[in-house]
Amino acid sequence: MCASHRAVRGLIVELTGYGKHTVTDMEAGLEHLKRGTAKNVDMMLIVVEPYYRSLEAGMRTFKLATELKIPHLYAVSNKVRTEADREAIETFCQQHSIPIITTIPYDENLIESERKAIAPIDFNPVAPSMQAIGHISDWVLARG
């Protein structure tokens, strides 16, 4: 295992002792799963967008995480602009038995906050994307 993955895995293990939940944003792809970085993960939210490559990557992540026995796996629909986007994600996830917990709409506020180097929650805390992300937090906390 390379040093960077070993360091991240060690950090995750260390952080799990400080509270009930540790949230980690991993880069897209399977590398963190293949290298054991997600070894102590008990819930994984797999972010998928309404594009074939994103959906395929999400499906591969779900399959590998299932093989690694991560007990709680869910999809989050992201950058959804239209009903067709929502249906594409829902249909794909249903075909692969991937439960979806929520949808984050495409939101220009996220782009603007990035341009201005301001955290999205500080840029516009009532933006549609921030409300959807808040629902994710509430959902996770409700599950203990």
Image (tube, grey):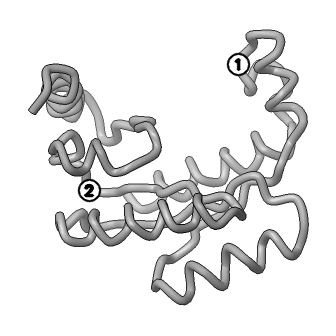
> Can you tell which quarter of the image residue 20 is in?
top left
Q: Amino acid at mark 1?
A: Ala
Q: Which residue is mark 1?
A: 119
* In the image, farthest residue toward the bottom: 95
- Please determine whether, in this image, residue 70 is positioned above or below residue 92: above
User: How many other residues sit within 10 Å of disc 1, few (<14), some (14-19) or many (≥20)?
Assistant: few
Given contact means CB atoms under 8 Å apart, are the residues at marks 2 and 1 in contact?
Answer: no
Q: Which residue is mark 2?
A: 42
Number of numbered discs on residues = 2
* Residue shown at 55% from the left, 54% from the top: 47
- Please determine whether, in this image, residue 68 is positioned above or below residue 135: below
Where residue 36 appears, as percent x and y from the top left, is 15, 44
In the image shown, does 26 or 127 lie closer to the viewer?
Answer: 26
User: How many other residues sit within 10 Å of disc 2, few (<14), some (14-19) or many (≥20)?
Assistant: few
> Can you tell which quarter of the image residue 78 is in?
bottom right
- Please determine whether, in this image, residue 44 is positioned above or below residue 137: below
Where residue 21 appears, as percent x and y from the top left, is 34, 41
Q: Disc number at residue 130? A: none
In the image shown, does 77 or 137 lie closer to the viewer?
Answer: 77
